[in-house]
Image (cartoon, coloured by chain):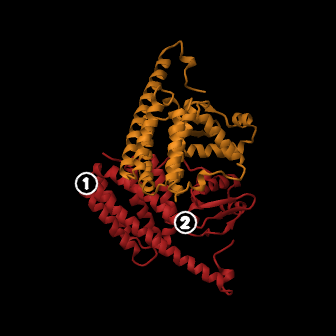
Chain colours: A red, B orange
């Protein structure tokens, strides 16, 4: 019987200051409160969160390694702006991971596992806003990873999903995309129900291919808007570039 | 034309104190100067390396995330002892990554790429000791990853290769294993030369399957030795457990 690994279950230990700082910063990046391209001071963030600079700096080191920020010595940190190449690389990697996960777990799924994954997808369909859709979408993908009981797959997918949700929040605000994604997930579940690993992996490939295309379209759109804002002298000061 | 990504080429910036501490600690863990199961004080390590505690602590946070150590608040840090499950999970993940890498790069390899990879394997064959064998072996696997030009694959494989070399240093000291590994690499190169992606991936699967088996055999052997030492009252104090 496959169970989710401990990595995804509740932990008893209280989170450290660094973990709190990491979660707070990551959330603010994912929901675009901290904006791509902008520079922020560690001191100001520390003051705002009411903790010392050390855990903030440690959390930023983590976020830098995960691709979210760039630390600027003596100046603070800059929130990264993902390029189209970053997104393509991200999806290439994510596709490789998720395909392997499905090939590993599909032959061993229990009825209970199928029930959980179906209910996550149902809840994603009923989500009222992009952020709660993303929560269930994350649940769908990471629950499958957790069934591998292999921490290397779980951690790699957790990280790549964070990066991908960063762009995803905007994409899933697009009319109809969330519903489309739920249908694509349902195709994966259908193949899992038939215990067809290759079929499930193919359905996932299709889902990720469409998601990637939507991401790239949305990015091209945002980049065009930024360019227009920069060319228009009246909106230049309100543009999203710079602190 | 495929070129190695910048991630593997020389960098111009001098390394930070944290990077120096990270490299020094990692090297000492990989060559077993810092021993699995033993507890060390951050203060003592800082003194030994002649730098302050902050970069040491930052480096340890990194090493903890990568699976090498466990930070013990107010006590120091403990070097992890990999379990058989860790090794199996590691190889399952590594296999997924390296298979994807080969399927991606095989169709696009240039003659120059093939020349480089062949020369790395030739140098591995001529290596005089396990540590230099591991250096060329690392070169072989990471050069292939670098040709994807995808930083997610490159970073994931760099990290998993470090963990795997940690056990590997002992395995490749085994008579004959290094030569066997070079032959298995040659089978991968042969398929790459034929521009046969699936054939190359299969040869890599075979190489990793044998390597994993040798790792697990070596671990079982070491564990048996530890157990015997613990059962023998005369050698108990000299056993490899504890600081």
Total label count?
2
**Structural distance between the alpha carbons of marks 1 and 2:** 35 Å
Instruction: Please report the residue visible at 59 percent of the width from the left and 32 percent of the height from the top.
Output: B31
Dot 2 crowding, Cα within 10 Å, few <14, some 14–19, many 20+:
many
Instruction: Please report the residue visible at 49 percent of the width from the left and 22 percent of the height from the top.
Output: B226
Give the residue number, with chain letter if any, for mark 2.
A30
Label 1 in the same subunit as label 2: yes
Looking at the figure, which quarter contains the C terminus of chain A?
A: bottom right
Compared with B93, A77 (above or below) is below
Say whether disc 1 or disc 2 marks the residue closer to the N-terminus: 2
- Which chain is home to disc 1? A
Residue B88 appears in the figure: no
Instruction: Please report the residue visible at 30 percent of the width from the left and 65 percent of the height from the top.
Output: A187
- Which chain is home to disc 2? A
Taking A204 as reference, is B130 left or right? Answer: right
Q: Are marks 1 and 2 in contact (CB under 8 Å)?
A: no
Q: Quadrant of residue B241?
A: top right
């Amino acid at each position: 019987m496959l169970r989710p690994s401990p990595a995804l279950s509740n932990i008893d230990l209280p989170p450290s200051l660094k973990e709190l700082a990491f979660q707070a910063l990551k959330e603010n990046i994912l929901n675009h409160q901290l904006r791509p391209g902008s520079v922020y001071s560690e001191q100001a963030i520390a003051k705002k969160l009411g903790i010392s600079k050390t855990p903030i700096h440690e959390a930023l080191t983590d976020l830098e390694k995960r691709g979210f920020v760039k630390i600027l010595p003596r100046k603070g940190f800059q929130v990264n702006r993902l390029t189209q190449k970053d997104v393509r690389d991200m999806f290439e990697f994510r596709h490789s991971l998720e395909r392997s996960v499905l090939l590993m777990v599909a032959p061993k799924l229990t009825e209970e596992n199928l029930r959980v994954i179906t209910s996550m997808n149902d809840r994603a369909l009923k989500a009222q806003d992009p952020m709660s859709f993303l929560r269930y979408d994350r649940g769908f993908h990471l629950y499958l990873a957790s069934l591998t009981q292999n921490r290397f797959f779980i951690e790699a997918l957790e990280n790549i999903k964070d990066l991908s949700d960063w762009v995803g929040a905007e994409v899933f605000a697009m009319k109809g995309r969330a519903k489309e994604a739920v249908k694509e997930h349902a195709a994966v579940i259908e193949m899992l129900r038939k215990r067809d690993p290759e079929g499930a992996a193919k359905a996932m490939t299709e889902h990720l291919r469409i998601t990637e295309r939507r991401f790239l379209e949305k990015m091209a759109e945002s980049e065009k808007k930024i360019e227009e804002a920069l060319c228009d002298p009246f909106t230049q000061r309100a543009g999203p570039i710079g602190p």
